[in-house]
């Protein structure tokens, strides 16, 4: 049912795939071309750990001059929950959480 007539035979030395063509990029263009999410998160994690200071056990009293999670969150302009998650990820705060990690790893 071809309306274009019979096909021409191809010679044996003709390549089947064109190699000199450049494919167009498809999809939505990036909103922030130079933005690397992983790098930004790593930098924020380092800032949170440096701002918070030394690790502490939540069962013991912390010195009064030591920064709190809320003060670190205000300084970094993020929520306290995100700061807490970053500190747990960096294994800096809450010794109880470290005990839970150890129990989860042991068989």
Image (spheres, grey):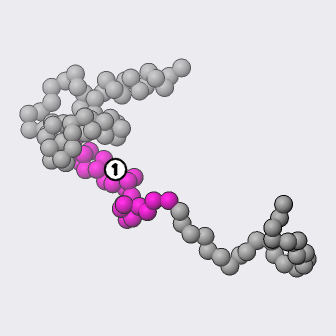
Quarter that holds the N terminus: bottom right
| Residue 87 makes an appearance in the image | no
Q: Position of residue 16 (x, y in %)?
A: 80, 71
Stretch of the chain drawn in magenta: 27-53
Q: Position of residue 53 (x, y in %)?
A: 21, 42
Left or right of 81: which side holds 22? right
Reading the image, the residue beneath label 1 is 41
When the figure is inspected, residue 80 is found, relative to residue 3, above or below; the finding is above
Left or right of 12: which side holds 62? left
| Residue 25 makes an appearance in the image | yes
Left or right of 98: which side holds 57? left
Seen at 41% across and 27% down, the residue is: 101
Judge whether residue 29 is colored magenta: yes
Q: Quadrant of residue 57?
A: top left
Q: Position of residue 41 (x, y in %)?
A: 34, 50
Q: Quadrant of residue 98?
A: top left
Quarter that holds the C terminus: top right
Mark 1: give few (<14), some (14-19) or many (20+) Cα within 10 Å: few
Seen at 33% across and 54% down, the residue is: 40
């Amino acid at each position: 049912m071809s309306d274009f007539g019979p096909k021409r035979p191809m010679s044996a030395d003709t390549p089947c795939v064109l190699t000199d063509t450049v494919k167009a990029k498809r999809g939505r263009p990036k909103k922030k071309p130079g933005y690397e999410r992983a790098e930004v998160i790593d930098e924020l994690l380092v800032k949170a750990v440096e701002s918070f200071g030394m690790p502490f056990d939540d069962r013991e009293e912390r010195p009064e001059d030591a920064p709190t999670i809320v003060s670190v969150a205000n300084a970094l302009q993020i929520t306290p929950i995100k700061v807490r998650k970053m500190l747990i990820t960096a294994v800096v705060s809450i010794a109880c959480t470290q005990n839970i990690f150890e129990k989860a790893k042991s068989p």
